[in-house]
Image (cartoon, rainbow, N blue to C red):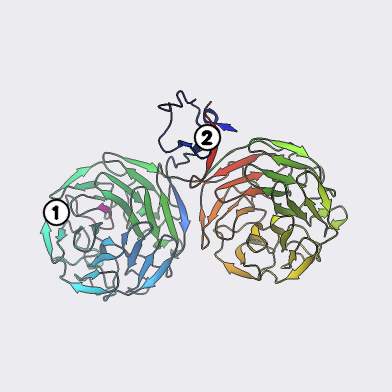
């Protein structure tokens, strides 16, 4: 059993009273289990960007309102023309909804997903408009115009369509540049105190009474101004002067996230955090860009679309700020035998590793993991590499692979003590295949290296025989595989080139679903058809991606880049072991996602 001291580094001093060194919410007494439970405090230390689902249409210079999980993007520039398009984000995917009335781009925006405003903006070479449109969750209505028509101004307002602030901006053709500030009361716009520095394409966030404006053009600026409901005051500058439609997120003038934009003639991904007095540089956007949709808070922001080399993009990224729960890899106990091209089964704390290649030859070595160390147990009957398997630590299956005699059809089952060679053999001899199973009585084998070089063959095992069923849509080998014989995933792999294709098995047939973000092969995948984790792969990759049933998001990397790896566990508690680094490795890493990573511990 793990101890609190081992996990936290501080012993519990008084279990009957105050628990010394305990952070509230991480340790508690479970009276039903009569034991203490510890919730891992995995949190981001500097924040990180992860990939979300793309916009339906690549575009730039949109108006954006709402949160990271409930956002609205309206208007924009499609390249050849302004658009009336509106898309809604639910935290997973974008859906096109009712268009605005007037096509435009470089608009101001305020409100939330169900109660929003879009105002002013550009309509192409003919100039700017002053129009204001209000959204009630189902339809757009034209209301009173802004006093000064302009484009690319900053805006603030986080509550609904009855309060907003609009400041700065530029006229058609790049001039004049404005410092004007206007306030919206739900009916009309009123001019209030101007910005100290006229500018456009700046970043902004906050409310009608507490806002920030930072950076901007032209020339590019680092200056930041704070709005207190009455006037603007200059505060600390950005670390990187930039314009080009900087992303801005934050609830008021005391906290903000500034990200992306254009600096010195180049798109940038620079991200900076504001704490009310200074800006601090943190993790960059994955895709450097300008003029993108941006909204949210300092700890949960959104970036979507925009202009990025070599042109308009539909890519979406989500920011998880410092202190937020996030999955992370930590070092586990090393295998006794370093190897690659091995099979794996079980959970993070009760796993099985079998077969593989040490670099000096194929082995049948089997090892059992108890959550901290590996112990050698009985070997496979047939030493082989590039096999695959699944199941539990006490009921597993291994199939296929390669021996000096070539591709294998052999199947072995594990009963918790030893391997038994099954009279059932695969119909198609192959290696680098996918195998998924809940135990040793039912399994699905698919893909692999045939011949032909890659195959789509899928076979179902019922405990007695293998039967051919519906093939994969894409022939491939070296893929990640997770789930069981009734519901699973085939992830990425090798088709002659690296592929990102993901397919979902429903017990009868395969359906192509959302691709992984990075094409690769020799990776592992663990979890279910709807919640899974994919990690490692070519070329000696550290990449880790999470699947939510719809799309893949990049998350925290492995410590050791590797390929042809062994894996076990679930999306929230996975194990990565062995692999090729280059060279065989014994390294083991444990993945813990704090959403449900809980362990029983003693109080010593």
Per the rendering, the mark at residue 433 is none
Q: Is residue 202 magenta?
A: yes
Compare residues 264 and 283 and report the one nearer the observer. 283
Among the 4 quarters of the image, the one containing residue 18? top left
Alpha-carbon span between mark 2 and mark 1? 62 Å
Looking at the rendered structure, the secondary structure element under dot 1 is: loop
118 left or right of 83?
A: left
Look at the image and tell me in which quarter the N terminus lies.
Answer: top right
Relative to 84, is 397 above or below? above
204 left or right of 461?
A: left
Please give the range of residues in magenta: 196-206
Query: Residue tagged by mark 1?
Result: 194
Among the 4 quarters of the image, the one containing residue 108? bottom left
Q: Residue at x 30, y 47 (%)?
A: 256
Per the rendering, the mark at residue 35 is 2
Query: How crowded is the residue under tag 1: few (<14 C-alpha within 10 Å), some, or many (20+)?
Result: some
- Which residue extends farthest top? 13
Residue 52, x across and y down, in percent: 46, 59
Q: Residue at x 52, y 44 (%)?
A: 597
479 left or right of 279?
A: right
């Amino acid at each position: 059993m793990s101890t609190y001291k081992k996990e936290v580094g501080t012993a519990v001093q008084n279990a009957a009273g105050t628990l010394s060194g305990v952070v509230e919410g991480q340790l508690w007494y479970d009276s039903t289990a009569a034991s203490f439970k510890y919730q891992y405090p995995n949190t981001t230390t500097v924040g990180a960007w992860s990939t979300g689902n793309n916009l339906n249409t690549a575009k730039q210079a949109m108006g954006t309102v709402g949160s990271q999980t409930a956002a609205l993007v309206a208007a924009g520039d499609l390249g050849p023309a302004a658009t009336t398009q509106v898309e809604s984000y639910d935290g997973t995917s974008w859906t096109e909804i009712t268009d605005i009335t007037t096509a435009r781009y470089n608009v101001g925006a305020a409100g939330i997903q169900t109660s929003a405003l879009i105002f002013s903006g550009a309509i192409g070479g003919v100039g700017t408009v002053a129009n204001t449109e209000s959204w009630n969750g189902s339809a757009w209505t034209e209301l009173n115009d802004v006093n000064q028509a302009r484009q690319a101004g900053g805006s603030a307002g986080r509550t609904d369509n009855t309060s907003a602030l609009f400041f700065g901006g530029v006229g058609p053709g790049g001039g004049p540049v404005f410092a004007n500030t206007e306030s919206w009361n739900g009916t009309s716009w009123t001019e209030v105190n101007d910005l100290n520095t006229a500018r456009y394409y700046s970043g902004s966030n906050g409310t009608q009474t507490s806002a920030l404006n930072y950076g901007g053009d032209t020339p590019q600026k680092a200056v930041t101004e704070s709005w207190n409901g009455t006037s603007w005051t200059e505060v600390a500058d950005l670390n990187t002067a930039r314009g080009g439609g900087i992303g801005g997120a934050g609830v008021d003038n005391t906290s903000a996230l500034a990200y992306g934009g254009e600096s010195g003639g180049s798109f940038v991904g620079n991200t900076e955090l504001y704490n009310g007095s200074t800006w601090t540089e943190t993790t960059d956007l994955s895709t450097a860009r300008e003029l993108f949709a941006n909204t949210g808070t300092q700890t949960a922001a959104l970036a979507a679309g925009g202009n990025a080399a070599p042109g308009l993009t539909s890519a979406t990224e989500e920011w998880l700020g410092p202190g937020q729960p996030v999955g992370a890899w930590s070092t586990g106990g090393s295998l006794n035998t370093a190897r690659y091209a091995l099979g794996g089964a079980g959970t993070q704390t009760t796993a099985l590793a079998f077969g593989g290649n040490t670099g000096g030859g194929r082995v049948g070595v089997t090892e059992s993991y108890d959550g901290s160390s590996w112990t050698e147990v009985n070997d496979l009957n047939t030493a082989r590499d590039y096999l695959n398997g699944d199941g539990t630590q006490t009921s597993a299956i291994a199939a296929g692979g390669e021996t000096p005699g070539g591709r294998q059809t052999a199947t072995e089952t594990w009963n918790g003590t030893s391997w038994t060679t099954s009279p059932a053999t695969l119909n198609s001899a192959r290696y680098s295949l996918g195998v998924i199973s809940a135990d040793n009585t039912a399994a699905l084998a698919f893909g692999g290296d045939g011949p032909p070089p890659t195959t789509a063959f899928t076979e179902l095992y019922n405990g007695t025989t293998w039967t051919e069923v519906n093939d994969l849509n894409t022939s491939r080998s070296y893929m990640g595989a997770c789930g069981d014989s009734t519901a699973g995933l085939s992830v990425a792999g090798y088709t002659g080139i690296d592929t990102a294709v993901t397919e979902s098995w429903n017990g009868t047939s395969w359906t192509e679903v959302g691709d992984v973000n990075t094409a690769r092969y020799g990776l592992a995948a663990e979890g279910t058809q709807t919640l899974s984790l994919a990690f490692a792969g070519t070329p000696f990759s550290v990449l880790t991606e999470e699947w939510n049933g719809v799309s893949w998001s990049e998350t925290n990397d492995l410590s050791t880049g590797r390929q042809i790896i062994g894996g076990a566990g679930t999306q929230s508690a996975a194990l990565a072991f062995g692999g090729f680094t280059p060279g065989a490795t014994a390294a083991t890493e444990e993945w813990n996602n704090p959403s449900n990573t809980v362990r029983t511990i003693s109080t010593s």
